[in-house]
Amino acid sequence: MGEYDRREGELETVRRRTEAELAAELANAEDRRRRARGLDWSKIDDGFVDDVRSALLLPDAPWMQPEKPSFVARLRAWFARLIAWFRSLFGRTPTRAPKVRGARSVVFARLGEGGRSIGSSDLGEAIARLTPDERQQLTERVDQTLSARERDLRREAEEKRRQAEEQRRALAAEREEARRRAEEEERGRVRDAESRRLEREMKERGFVTEKDGTLAVTYGLVERFARLVLEEETRQLPADARLSLAGGASTGVYEKARLRQPEEIAHLDLPSSILAARQAGLRHIDESTSYVYREVTSERVHVVLAFDRSGSMAEGEKLPAAKKALLALYVAIRRRHPDATIDVVAFDNRVDLLDLVELWECTPGAFTNTAEALRTAFLLLRASRATRREVYLVTDGLPEAYTDSDGSVRSGNLPMAMEAALGRARELATVRPLKFSLILIRSEHPEYEAAAREITRTLEGTMVVTDPNRLGVELLVRWIGTSETIRQPVNPLPAPRPVAASPAPGAATAKGRRRKSDRRMGG
C-alpha cells in the first residue's frame, strides 16, 4: 500500500506540473492573439515574424496567386517575344523585354532546401507591396494561425488531463485489487492456520484420522454429533417425555434382600435398613439389618433401525433428516440401555448393515426394496435372545423392488414388490415379542400411505406420517412410549413398602419421583 501511495503522489505531481505548463502556454497564446489584432505592419514585433512569414506563405493566400494579364497584354507579350526571336535570328542584340503592366515586381518566396521560404530582407518589401485589403486578410490569417495553435494547446491539455485521469483510475483499480489480494491472502493464511489447529485438535481427541491421505471422521465424532442432535431433538419433547428419556424407567428386574457382599452397599435401600435396625433395637445399621436392591434379571434389548436410502430420499432434506433422526435414537437407546444390541440397516435395491460412520456417509441409491429390509430384520431378531425386540423403519414411499428366489433384484413391478413386502412382514411378525414402528415421510401420493398402513397392520405395529423436520421427535416419542414390566420385589420385612411398576409415559407424580430414586440405588 505504501508503494501505491508513492506512485499516486508522483502521478499527482506530474499532473499538476503539466497543468501549470499548459495553463502558462494558453495564457501566452491568448496574449499573442490580443496583440496580433493590433499589429503595426510598419514595425513587426520579433515575436510575430515567424507567424507573419507562415501566413504570407499560405498557398491559398490571394497574394500567392499569380495575376492574370488581360488579352491585350498577352497579345503584346506575344508580339514582343516574336520580335525578339526575329532579332536573335538576324544576329541583333536582343532588347530587354517590356514589363507587363500589372505583373508583380516583388519576390514573395524562394524555393530552398527546406521548401518554400521568404527571407527577412524580403519580408518588409512583401508587406509593403500588399494592398490594404490584403493586409487586413494577412492580419486575419495571423489571428487564425494563433487561434488554431491555441485550440491545439487546449486539445493537448484536455488529452493530458484525460490520460492523467485514466492513469489515476488504473492505479486506483490496481491498488484496490492489490488490497483485495492481500486481504484474501491474509484470510487464507488465517483459515489455513485455523484449519491446521482444528485438524490437530480433532486428531488429538480422536474425532478424525488419516485415511488414504485424506481426513476421515471417526466413530467418536459421529457419536458426539449424535449426542448434540439428541439434545436438540429432546428440546421439542414434553417435560415428562424428557424425564423418561433421561433414564426414568427401569432397565431390569430387581428384588430387595439382605446384604451379601460388601460391593452391594452401593445399592443400599436406606429406608428399609433403618427400619430394620430400629425394629432390632439398634441405633446404627449393620450387616444384619442392611437391605439392598439386587438385580435378578437384566432386560436385554435388541433394536433394528432400518431406513430407506433410495433415489427418492435425495429430494429435499429427507436423507440428512433420516440420518440425524436415527443418530439421535441410537444415542437415546444407548443412554438407557448401554448393553443393547442396535443394528442399523440401510436399504435400496440391496440391504447393508452400517456402523455410525457409514450411516452418516451413506448416499442415495436406486429403488426401494422394503421386502429385503424386513427379511434382514427378521434374520437379525430371530436369533436374538433379547427380551425386548423393536424395529423402526423410516421410508418415503411404497415398495418398488423385490428379490426373487434366485437372489436377483427385480424392480418396476409394484404389485409384486408389495406382495413380497407383505410376505416378509408376515414372516417378521412371527418374532415374539416384537414392537414395529413405521415412520412415513409425508408425500403427495395417497397410495404410499395406503401401502405403509397395510405393512404396519400385518406387523400389528404403529405408523405415523410426518415431515422430515419431525422425524427425530417421532422416533423418540415411539421409543419412550414402550411399556416395561418389572417384577414385584420380595420384602421379608413386616409391612413392606412395595416397589411399584414403572409409570406410563407422561405420569410425572410424586411416586414416580420416589421410584426414580429407588432405581438409582438399585442400579
Image: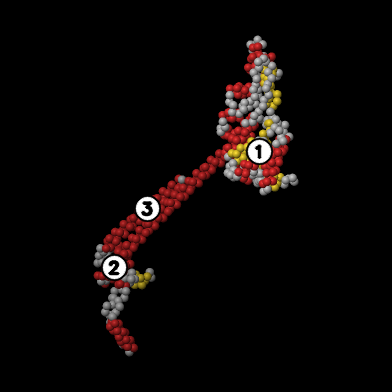
**Secondary structure found at label 1:** helix
Q: Position of residue 61 (x, y in %)?
A: 31, 71
Quarter of the image for residue 512 reads top right
Residue type for callout 2:
Leu
Which numbered marker is on residue 17? 3
Q: Helix or strand or loop: what does disc 2 sit on?
A: helix
Q: Earlier in the sequence, mark 3 or mark 2?
A: 3
Residue linked to disc 2? 138
Instruction: Tell me which numbered mark, 1 or 2, is placed earlier along the sequence.
Output: 2
Mark yes or no: residue 410 visible. yes
Image position, residue 506 (x, y; %): 59, 28
The amino acid sitting under disc 1 is Thr
Q: Identify the coloring.
A: secondary structure
Camera-nearest label, 1 or 2: 1
Res. 456 mark: 1
Residue 117 lies, with reference to residue 356, above or below; the image says below
Q: CA distance from mark 1 to mark 2?
A: 114 Å
